[in-house]
Each structure stands twice: as structure tokens, then as C-alpha cells.
Image (cartoon, rainbow, N blue to C red):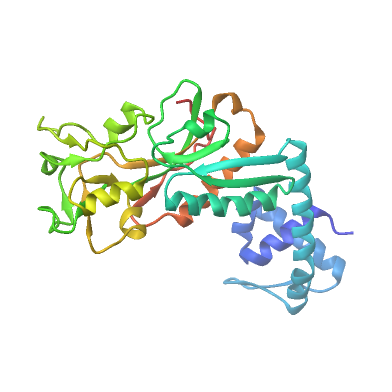
Amino acid sequence: MLERGEMEMFLALAEELHFGRTAERLYCSTGRVSQTIKQLERRVGAPLFERTSRRVELTSLGRRLRDDLLPLYEGIRGAMERAEAAGRGITGTLTVGFMGTQNARVLSAARDVFELRSPDCDVRVVETHLHHHTAQLRDGTADLLLITLPVSEPDLTVGAVITRSTRYMCLAADHRLAGHDVVSFEDLAGETFIDAAGSVPDYWTDFHMPRTTPGGRPIGRYGEPCTTYAEALALVAARRAIVPGDRQLPVVYGRPDIHFAVVADMPPVEQGLVWRTRDDADPRVRAFADVVLEIAPALSPPETTHVPRSTEDTVTPA
């Protein structure tokens, strides 16, 4: 009978083809890996690996054993993950909200991974708009949000910052700064930002659309608040306002009547996970947040930095 540990070690070496890397991956000694593989080879009565001073390769018997064992091992691991998820209370339905197309992509991919690992819990992905801010957490229509920070509310927890991106500005194609790919914060003096709905906290609006430049020169606000990004971009194209954002803007919203310029000296734009503080101990929230942290780097657009996960905890209070 092949024990699970022996199976895991054989399959790890079959993938790494290096005794040292296999030992590091399994947190054991190289001697332990060598001893276990030799025991397996004595049991089957033939070599599973060809070893030289320069390389390690599977024999034909080793390849056959790998192909036979891999689906069995994946089945065992999946069964254990599902049992552990049920044991931790990861059941029911979790509703997660996104602000922006890039965040939608991340949450949709995270849902696929999460539901594979926790099949007793369904994930519903919904959109949240600029004017919602965190309202969907408070009215119960979302359990977790991936939105543009900052969020500083006494009843909400800001978990991990998922990405940090270069600040961009949306300008009309014939704007006075449209000939520049990079502009400064001071260059925005005399311009007019959009204004957010009253449901958006002042601290959020002032962070993203300051009323003055670093030199103290005024920046205006458009008289009618915007509730969606589509409304904001319509004002930009009509040369009535400018709109800030991150690296996804030129990727997602590229259009001939709008120019996107980097504002190198403004703070970067951060996207983060937010949930109700009373749900801090909800295993579904924690497990889904872990999946988002795991998959986000591969999905991030250029000029976007993945914020390293804390080795102690993914959650920091707001």
C-alpha cells in the first residue's frame, strides 16, 4: 500500500526533477527524499528515476506511475480540501462586489478557484458603482467588496491591499495637456474634477480629487455629481471635467476622444478588500480573501504592483 506522504514525495520529484528543490518544497531533508524514493523503487522492483551528476529524469516506468497516481492524488487532495472547508463552515452563499472592470476580472477568476475548493459555498459576483462606495456592505447586498481605497469606517474592516497602480488622468483628446503622456500634479491647476455623489465620503473624494495643487493653486469640481464612471467619461469627452483613475483606464476605456496621462507625483491608486467588521471571523470571507490574494498578481495589468501578503495575517483594521 502506498502512503499519501510517499505519493506526494514521488509526484513532487517527478515535477521538480531535482532532489534539493523537492526537499525545499516538502520542508524535509534531501536525504529523506532520496531514502523514500529508493524504498519505492525496491518495492516496485525497478528504477523510477534515472540519476546522473547533472540531471534527474523519469524512467518509462516512473512516467507510467506518475500518470496513474496524479489523478488519484488530486482526487484525495480535493476530497480533503472539501472536507476541511465544510468543517470550517464554508457553506451557503457569499456575495462579492467589484468596482471597475479589472476588479471584476479578479473576482470572477477567484470565484472559480474558491468554488472548486469549497463546493458547498456558492459565490455571487455583483457590481458596485462609484456612488455606492461601501453601501452594499451595510444594506446586506454584498458580504465583501473589492473597491478603490481609501475606506476608513468604524464598522468596516479593510483587509489586504490587492494592487497598487500608477495614477492616471483622463483628459479630452484636444485638452491643453493631451500632448503629454506624463503630467505633474501642479499642471492640473485651474482644471475641473468631476464630483462624486453625496453618498461617497468626503475623505475619499478629496484624496482622489484634491481641491488644490501642492502649490496651493485651486482645482475645481463640476457642479453635478457623477454616479458611474460612464457618466464621468462623458464629461471628459465633452471637455467639462477631468477624471482620475489607475492603469486599467487606457486598457479598458481606450477611445479616440479621450487621452490618458500619467500623473507621476500623485499618490498611487490602491484596490483593496473590504468587509463588515462583525464578519472578521467568517471563514468564508477569510478563505475568499486568500484566493483573491493568490490569483491577483497573474491578472494585474502592466504598471500595477501586487502588494505582498503579510506572513502573519491578511487582515489589518481600518
Q: Position of residue 235 (x, y in %)?
A: 24, 48
Q: Position of residue 295 (x, y in %)?
A: 53, 52
Identity of the residue drawn at 45% across and 39% down = 272
Identity of the residue drawn at 44% across and 36% down = 132
Outermost residue to the front:
224
Q: Quadrant of residue 74?
A: bottom right
Outermost residue to the right:
1
Identity of the residue drawn at 61% across and 46% down = 124
Q: Is residue 192 above or below residue 154?
A: below
Horizontal arrangement in the rendering, residue 256 relative to residue 295 (left or right): left
Outermost residue to the top:
154
The residue closer to the viewer here, 232 or 186, is 232
Tell me if residue 164 can be seen. yes
Horizontal arrangement in the rendering, residue 195 relative to residue 111 (left or right): left
Tell me if residue 170 can be seen. no
Identity of the residue drawn at 60% across and 41% down = 95
Q: Quarter holding the C terminus? A: top left
The residue closer to the viewer here, 6 or 213, is 213
Q: Position of residue 24 (x, y in %)?
A: 60, 52
Q: Quarter holding the N terminus? A: bottom right
Q: Is residue 48 above or below residue 288?
A: below
Horizontal arrangement in the rendering, residue 290 relative to residue 69 (left or right): left
The residue closer to the viewer here, 57 or 81, is 81
